[in-house]
């Protein structure tokens, strides 16, 4: 049984649910996500797990109404049941006191960024967060993220909110004026590519989650974990019912699509596939 026991509307498109569930709560770590399924099997979405409460047997998740399936779940209320919850999936984020951490969230990638930021803040890190979207409407969870970040830089492609600029420009400026000990990026393929172009240059350890904007039947449920393993630059993409190895960013972007042309071509060395 998976029953919604609390609901909080964070914005017009973002809802937080606390769900009493029978899944293995003790196995869930920060960075994991679960799959919500309706009774007819018509709607499935992946959602990040924000919090677990083993005593209450509940998980807290965030639903962003970015498509019809997500809107279906966002309309549910306390007392409603979610027929299926599968997971957890993905790899947990590495959380420790790194020192200075740069976190980047692009569009829907901002949602799974929040629980990671919360844990990084609790671990004592100094956090600079970049939130990026084509328009103002895509900047979500801003107040929640400001509460746990030491500095938040907001970017929109059209200049409708925050600064008008690119993640590339802001990363360059931030890394020139701050010594960063860890970088974590959440977003589409181009965001991951831009991030790694900079972190490879400065030799900064990097964690990333590739978040697809337009997930469909052939692209899984929207969230894919990408592990960048130090100087070896191995790229491994993992998702629910998905396991593939990409030897370079060009192929990753070709496979998952991109928003814009990026003037970087970064090849990863040909290492063996990492089983996920």
Image: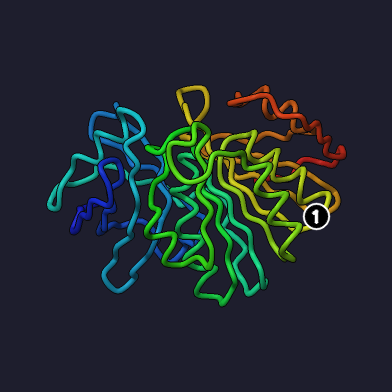
Q: How is the image coloured?
A: rainbow
Q: Residue 107 location, x and y as percent?
A: 48, 39
Residue position marked by numbered label 1 in the rendering: 230
When the figure is inspected, residue 182 is found, relative to residue 105, above or below; the finding is below
**x and y, in percent, of residue 221 in the image:** 46, 34
Which residue is more in the foreground, 42 or 152?
Answer: 152
Q: Circle 1 sits in a helix, a strand or a loop, which is it?
A: helix
Residue 268: quadrant of the picture? top right
Name the residue nearer the viewer: 205 or 157: 157
Tell me if I can see residue 208 in this picture.
yes
Callout 1 environment at 10 Å: few (<14), some (14 to 19), or many (20+)? Answer: some
Residue at the image point whose x is 43% and y is 48% from the top? 111
Q: Which residue lies most toward the left here? A: 79
**Could you tell me which residue is drawn at 59 percent across and 67 percent down?**
95
Number of numbered discs: 1
> With respect to residue 162, does 30 lie above or below?
below
Residue drawn at 50 percent across, 61 percent down: 30
Relative to 184, 74 lies left or right:
left
Toward the viewer: 120 or 262?
262
Q: Is residue 26 left or right of residue 40?
A: right
Tell me which corner region of the image, top left, top right, bottom left or bottom right, holds residue 115: bottom left
Determine if residue 1 is in view.
no
Q: Position of residue 7 (x, y in %)?
A: 20, 54
Could you tell me residue 198's position as x and y percent? 76, 47
């Amino acid at each position: 049984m998976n029953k919604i026991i609390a609901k909080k509307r964070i914005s017009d498109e973002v809802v937080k649910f606390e769900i009493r569930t029978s899944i293995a709560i003790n196995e869930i770590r920060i960075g994991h996500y679960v799959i919500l399924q309706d009774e007819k099997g018509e709607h499935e979405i992946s959602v990040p797990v924000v919090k677990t409460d083993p005593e209450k047997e509940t998980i807290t998740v965030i639903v962003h109404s970015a498509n019809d399936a997500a809107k279906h779940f966002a309309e549910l209320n306390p007392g409603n049941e979610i027929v299926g919850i599968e997971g957890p999936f993905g790899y947990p984020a590495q959380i420790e006191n790194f020192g200075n951490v740069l976190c980047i969230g692009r569009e829907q990638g901002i949602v799974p960024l929040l629980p990671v930021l919360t844990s990084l803040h609790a671990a004592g890190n100094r956090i600079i967060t970049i939130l990026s979207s084509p328009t103002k409407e895509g900047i979500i969870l801003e107040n929640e993220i400001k509460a746990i970040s030491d500095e938040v830089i907001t970017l929109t492609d059209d200049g409708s909110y925050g600064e008008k600029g690119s993640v590339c420009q802001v990363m360059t400026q931030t890394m020139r004026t701050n010594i960063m000990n860890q970088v974590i990026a959440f977003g589409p393929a181009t965001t991951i590519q831009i991030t790694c172009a900079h972190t490879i240059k400065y030799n900064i350890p990097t964690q990333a989650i590739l978040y697809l904007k337009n997930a469909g039947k052939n692209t899984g449920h929207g969230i894919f974990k990408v592990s960048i393993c130090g100087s070896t630059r191995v790229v491994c993409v993992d998702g629910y019912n998905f396991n593939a190895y990409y030897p370079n960013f060009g192929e990753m972007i070709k496979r998952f699509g991109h928003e814009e042309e990026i003037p970087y071509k970064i090849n990863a060395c040909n290492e063996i596939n990492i089983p996920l």
